[in-house]
Amino acid sequence: MKVHARGDRGSVTTEFALVLPVVVIVMGLALAALAWGGHRLQASDLASMAARTAAVEGDTSAHEAVSAAAPGAHLAVSRSGVWVTVTVSVESVSWLPTADARVTARAEP
């Protein structure tokens, strides 16, 4: 049988009470990072779709396609000669940066 000194009594509870908030904060940060990564992938997919749509069907069709796929996304289309550049921004959690993606495609004649 193990005998503990009187001063050790309750030390596990105290250590657990000190470590638990740290674990919860780290888990919250990890989940927020995963959510931001998902928003970044969504922005990339939307930018690819919008660039193809703008190159073939025009800017208005690209705006409609992005609005239908993700109502909160922001789209910017610019043209330079035969090239169409599309930038899509998707809002993330308020304290994380906006997830942006930029894609360039060759416009169809």
Image (cartoon, helix red, strand yellow):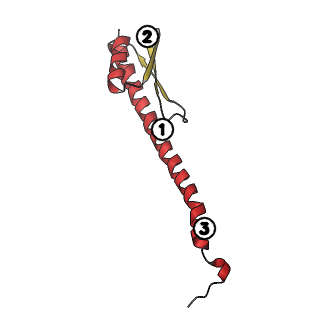
Task: Read off the residue under disc 2.
Answer: 82
Q: What's the residue type where badge 1 is placed?
A: Trp
The quarter of the picture where residue 39 lies is: top left
Looking at the picture, how far across and down is residue 4, in whole percent? 62, 84
Q: What's the residue type where badge 3 is placed?
A: Thr
10 Å neighbourhood of mark 1: few (<14), some, or many (≥20)? many
The dot on residue 4 is none
Of marks 1 and 3, which one's residue comes earlier in the chain? 3
Question: Mark 1 and mark 2: span between their CA atoms?
Answer: 33 Å
Observer-side mark, 1 or 2, equals: 1
Task: Read off the residue under disc 1.
Answer: 36
Q: Nearer the viewer, residue 107 or 19?
A: 19
Q: Give the answer, above or below, for where 19 lies relative to 44.
A: below
Assign the C terminus to one quadrant of the image.
top left
Label 2 SS: loop
Q: What's the residue type where badge 2 is placed?
A: Val
Q: Nearer the viewer, residue 73 or 106?
A: 73
Of marks 1 and 2, which one's residue comes earlier in the chain? 1
Question: Mark 2 and mark 3: span between their CA atoms?
Answer: 67 Å
Label 1 SS: helix
Task: Read off the residue under disc 3.
Answer: 14
Q: Give the answer, above or below, for where 85 lies relative to 33.
A: above
Label 3 SS: helix
Looking at the picture, how far across and down is residue 78, in whole percent? 47, 13
10 Å neighbourhood of mark 2: few (<14), some, or many (≥20)? few
The quarter of the picture where residue 20 lies is: bottom right
